[in-house]
Amino acid sequence: MEYTLLIQCDDKKGLIYKISKVLYENDFNIENQQEFVDKENNKFFFRAVINGEVDKEELKQKILKEIPCAKIEVFKKRKKRVFILATKEAHALGDILIKTYSNDLDIEILGVIANRDNLKELVEKFNIPFYYIPAENKSRIEHENEMLKIIKPLNPDFIILAKFMRILTPNFVEEFPNKI
C-alpha cells in the first residue's frame, strides 16, 4: 500500500538518516522523496511516498523517538483535489483538463468557476462541474463570496488559477492558506 509521509521540524544534521533508518527498520520502501530546508527560519520539510503496511500512529511514534517535536502526517496516497478558477481563455484550462484526462497530472478536478461562460462546453466534455459566476456589476467581495459558497464546502487541496486574471482579496486568500 502506498502512503505519503510528511514531516516538518527544525533543521539539524542527520534528519534524512534518522527518517530513513526508521523506515528501513520497519520494512518500508521509499518510492520517492523530497526535502527542503528553509534556511531563514531553520525549518526542514520532508515528503516521501512510501510502500508497505503501516500503522500510522505507530510509525509517527517511532519517528518522534528519533525527531522529537516533529509535525508528522501519514496518509494513503491519493490524487490532489483541486478547484480551478478560469476566465475566457481556453489554453491553460484546456491543457490542465487534457493532462488530467490522460493521467499526466495526479489530480482530481472538483469543479471550474469562470467569470465568462464560453468555457462551459469544454469543461463539461470532461464531466466536470462548471460554474459561471459573472463579475459585472458586483464588488470583488460579492463575487468572491459567491465563489466561496461553491468552493469552501468541497475543501480542495489546492485552487488553480488558469488564466484567472482578477486580483483576489486578502479575505479570499486567507480562506485557503497555502492552497492557491
Image: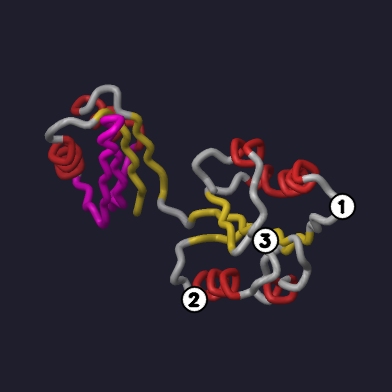
Residue 18 image-quadrant placement? top left
Dot 1 crowding, Cα within 10 Å, few <14, some 14–19, many 20+: few
Residue 163 % position (x, y): 60, 64
Task: Quickly name the residue at label 1.
Answer: 137
Q: Nearer the viewer, mark 3 or mark 1?
A: 1
- State left or right for residue 58 relative to residue 104: left
Above or below 52: residue 105: below
Above or below 97: residue 153: above
- State left or right for residue 74 relative to residue 85: left
What span is colored magenta in the figure? 27-55
Above or below 86: residue 59: above
Dot 2 amino acid type: Ser
Measured in 3D between alpha carbons, the distance from the residue under mark 3 to the one under mark 2, in whole angstroms, is 18 Å
Q: Residue at x 36, y 48 (%)?
A: 4
N-term-proximal mark, 3 vs 1: 3
Dot 1 amino acid type: Asn
Dot 2 crowding, Cα within 10 Å, few <14, some 14–19, many 20+: few
Is residue 38 on the magenta stretch?
Answer: yes
N-term-proximal mark, 3 vs 2: 2
N-term-proximal mark, 1 vs 2: 2
Q: Nearer the viewer, mark 1 or mark 2?
A: 1
Residue in front for this viewpoint, 62 or 95: 95
Residue 57 % position (x, y): 35, 31
Task: Quickly name the residue at label 2.
Answer: 102
Secondary structure beneath dot 1 equals loop
Dot 3 amino acid type: Val
